[in-house]
Amino acid sequence: MCLTLLHVTHGHQLYVYPVHLILSLITLACCVAATVMFDRLWRSEWTVLKLSLQITGPFLHIGAVILMTLMTWIIAGNWLQLSHKVLKTAWLCVYIGVMTVLYLCPLVINSPCVVTVTDLPPKPEVIGHRGAPAVAPENTILSFQSAASRNVWAFESDVRISFDGVPFLLHDSSLRRTTNISSAASKYADVSACWFNISEIKVFDAGSWYLTDDPYGTVSYLSEAQRQAISRQKVPTFAEMLQLAILEDRYVIFDLFTPPVKHPYHNTSEEIVVETILRSGIDQKKILWLRRNIPRGAENFTHTSGEFMPAEDLKRNNFRAVNLHYDMISEKDIRRLNMDNITTNIYIVNSVWMFSLYWCVGVHSVSTDQCQVFAEVDSPVWHMSPKSYLILWIAVDVLSAVIVVLLFIVQRVRLYGTKFNPETLSLQSGRTDSSYEDMYKSKNMKQKLLRNGDPFEIGLDQSNGSLNSSELPVGSYCLHTMNGNGVTSQTTDDAPVTNTHRPPVTSHTEIHADVP
């Protein structure tokens, strides 16, 4: 494509051979295959693309207008050289259509960040996803302490039940990834952690893996004291995390994983967790309960849905909040839930631009691994009032339209000249009905002759076999042939200059041309 564009820019002929067509088809097939693979492996990322277009839409519009305006120089040059009128008209209509669509794009661009300062929603609350895993090992007390120091609104964790009935914090089903069990007891590395007693789980080191794997690339920024604190971490119990939440006055949200079928507490895991919560003494409203069923004693928990439902259904089922992945809910749905006083938490949001987008939308909170980053964000990456965006939109479109017209005019003059050019008038004085194409050809012939060192534009006067050089205007070039003798190359008010170096011409003719 780049080579084709360069050829077109310089006016070179394009030669397409079968091998080019074959390579083009292979490239197209590869693109289709890559798109299908991307869709199957990372289908949720299409939502990320859609969200990114929402926040970058105004800038993409301006960029597209600028790009098409710059390409107008090439488009105009090639369009003016088309000879087929129907094809010329069709391409002009296509170009005008594309530019019109670009100019009117803001009518369909709905960016939440186009909002006045007074209408900008408050900054979303931040939920520490497994604590602050970018600065400390996930699901450890140190991680939740680090999250609390970054002013998170709530702790998010994963709860499992040990073989002796103690709730503890662990995301994976086994201890392999987040402890040193692979080196300490390798044959049990892939065994479900629920089959261990809590005393056995507490034996393993839950911090050293973080220093070795460096999952977020932040270990190099840690001090020696922080490294030592990390290496001393153990798998915490749910009760230990609740005590920290009470101390830091934080909300708690968690996923409860039901133990395997043959586990002694398979059918009573919810009751064990509720009992642990009630025994901790935490304010029950600060527990965001994600289970559809509410066990006895959990009536005062904040019932939170993990599935999207219309506001009417949520109220009917006593849900007061929703906890959803970003591809499960739209901007309009978030605003509708806000109007019905149902809070929304979005997970997992790790980029500042996405955090800014949900800030402008008005979401209540986001779960993130990057709470230390969001703590430093004081405003969205950008936001603009509708009036300012309208002025920018109109200014860019008007300026682009003016430049497009000028580029077409300049290309027209560059290729064909203008009928008011004195040089063209002199060359075409005897042809009042000549087209611009004829002028262009005449002009090229003159330039070709001058480049070849011959200052004559030759024209044969068929009406008269002789020429009175005195009748020629000053500066006229004239060639006399008289029986193969001398040649007079220019007539002026002085004596003619005889050129004896030109080859003789056998016929008695006169050849002359006016050159301004």
Image (spheres, grey):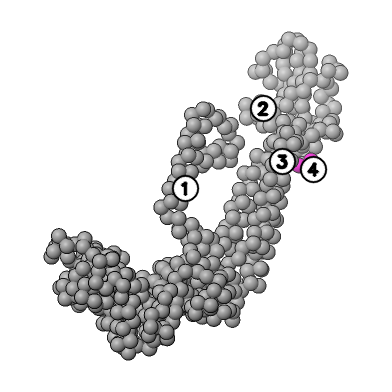
Comes first in the chain, label 2 or label 4:
4
Label 3 close to label 2 by CB (< 8 Å): no
Marks 1 and 2: which is nearer the front?
1
Nearer to me, 313 or 104: 313
The reply, left or right, for residue 349 in relation to residue 501 is: left
Amino acid of disc 2? Leu
Amino acid of disc 3? Ala
Comes first in the chain, label 3 or label 1:
1
Label 2 close to label 4 by CB (< 8 Å): no
The reply, left or right, for residue 11 in relation to residue 481 is: left
Q: CA distance from mark 3 to mark 2?
A: 38 Å
Q: Residue 305 lies in magenta, yes or no?
A: no
Amino acid of disc 4? Phe
Mark 3: secondary structure: helix
Magenta part, dominant SS: loop
Residue beneath label 3, please?
A: 90
Residue beneath label 1, please?
A: 35
Residue beneath label 2, please?
A: 449
Kindly identify which numbered label has been placed on residue 194.
none
Q: Quadrant of residue 291?
A: bottom left
Mark 2: secondary structure: helix
Nearer to me, 414 or 46: 46
Measuring from the top left, give residue 241's x and y in whole percent: 29, 81
Q: CA distance from mark 2 to mark 4?
A: 23 Å
Residue beneath label 4, please?
A: 420
Magenta residues?
A: 416-420
Measuring from the top left, give residue 271's x and y in whole percent: 32, 79
